[in-house]
Image: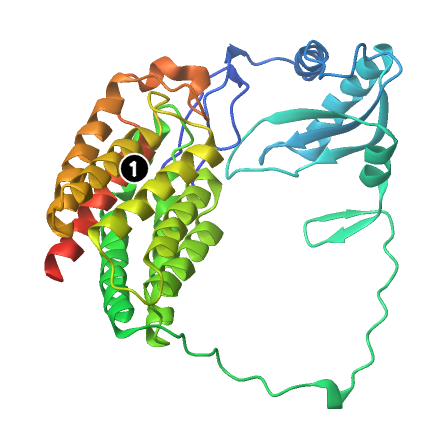
Amino acid sequence: CTLPGADHPLFTVPEDRMAVGLGIHGEPGIGEAAVPTADEAAELLVSTLLKELPDGVTAPDGQRAAVILNGLGSVKYEELFVVYRRVARLLADAGVQAVDPEVGELVTSFDMAGISLTLTWLDDTLEALWTAPADAPAYRKGSVPEAVAAQEDEASYETVSGPEPYVASDDSRHAAATALDALGRIKETVDAHADELGRIDAVAGDGDHGIGMQRGSSAAYEAALRAKELGAGARSLLTAAGDAWADRAGGTSGALWGIILRAVADALGDTEPPTPATVAHGVRQASDGVRRTGGAEIGDKTMVDVLVPFAETLVQQAAEKAELTAAWDRAADVAEQAARDTARLVPRMGRARPHAEKSLGTPDAGAHSLALIVRAVHGALATCQ
């Protein structure tokens, strides 16, 4: 697999060997085996899936299943159909009724050789949905009736104007300017460390953390800049940034960073000037939201290992009446140490978990990027003093 724009493969597999269970972006699988024949590959896939029946499926015999044999990017269709020939026979022998099977390139990566087999066990409702006609840019099935064009009524059209300016106090707009500066520094920091974040992530993950963070931070800054030009306060500006980060970054980290920015936005509002207490409250709400959504806790080797102590330190500093820049500086110190400490952990959640031992000695990419970001934000706070 080669990441877009990269000048070398994300991973390699030894000659004459096949990785088993490897993820679509190179996430480590469950082992390696000698490269099999087409029939042997089919037998491995079918036998493995039939050993792992989901709840409610007591035996495959007599069950209906949606079957997808997927080529990962560089396997020829002729080869896929040779493999499927054996897959179909094995499923039939086990009593599985293959419903409207799909054989093709449906989920791929650049330069990736390999196949995947998916079985989805069907009831009447799922079967009706699986066999329903579809007409989308990348997937078609059956025949979809042509849509009838709506009658155009010129009188129904309204003049489209630009977006309405935001309503915010001067204090909040001043805070929004600081937030915009912070987002710009975040973008610059992520750009400078993107390759490093990718290398860390590739140790036991898929290696795209740096790319995802670049997409997210760039989109967040651009959205915040547009909001600032329309007079946004802190809440509106950070909400726009959070929505853009979640939309453009993709993956789990994109969604979590959207949660973080929106939580801080809600705490700041668009009218009152921010205080150390309101900022700390927003960060604590962000920490709670990330744990609630992602399900991770301290010790799982995720960004939570940094976010929780950072939030707790910030709340403590605010309670002790520390000035915001000094409070953030102290909390950033704690975050940086917590990020370094993740090198001693083994992952208990996420893509890296199946090969936890590979990441021992390497910090978590999400934890490291969070520590870099909170330090970058401190620079913006120090400048606005």
Query: Horizontally, is 371 left or right of 50 in the view?
Result: left
Q: Residue at x 32, y 63 (%)?
A: 234
Left or right: where does residue 169 sit relative to residue 117?
A: left
* Callout 1 amino acid: Leu
> Looking at the image, is 144 positioned above or below residue 347?
below
Q: Which residue is mark 1?
A: 197
Visible in this render: residue 308? yes
Instruction: Please state the horizontal and vertical placement of residue 11, each as a whole percent of the image.
Output: 41, 27
In the depicted structure, whether residue 57 falls above or below residue 143? above
Could you say which is closer to the camera, residue 282 or residue 213? 282
10 Å neighbourhood of mark 1: few (<14), some, or many (≥20)? many
The residue closer to the viewer here, 14 or 141, is 141
Residue 132 image offset from top left, x and y in percent = 85, 44
Q: Quadrant of the C terminus?
A: bottom left
Q: Is residue 196 visible?
A: no
Residue at left offset 42%, top offset 42%: 256
Name which quarter of the figure residue 237 lies in. bottom left
Q: Viewer-proximal residue, 361 or 36?
A: 361
Q: Residue at x 28, y 67 (%)?
A: 172
Image location of residue 338, percent across then percent down: 22, 28
63 left or right of 268 in image = right
Q: x, y percentage for residue 306?
A: 27, 32
Q: Residue at x 42, y 61 (%)?
A: 240
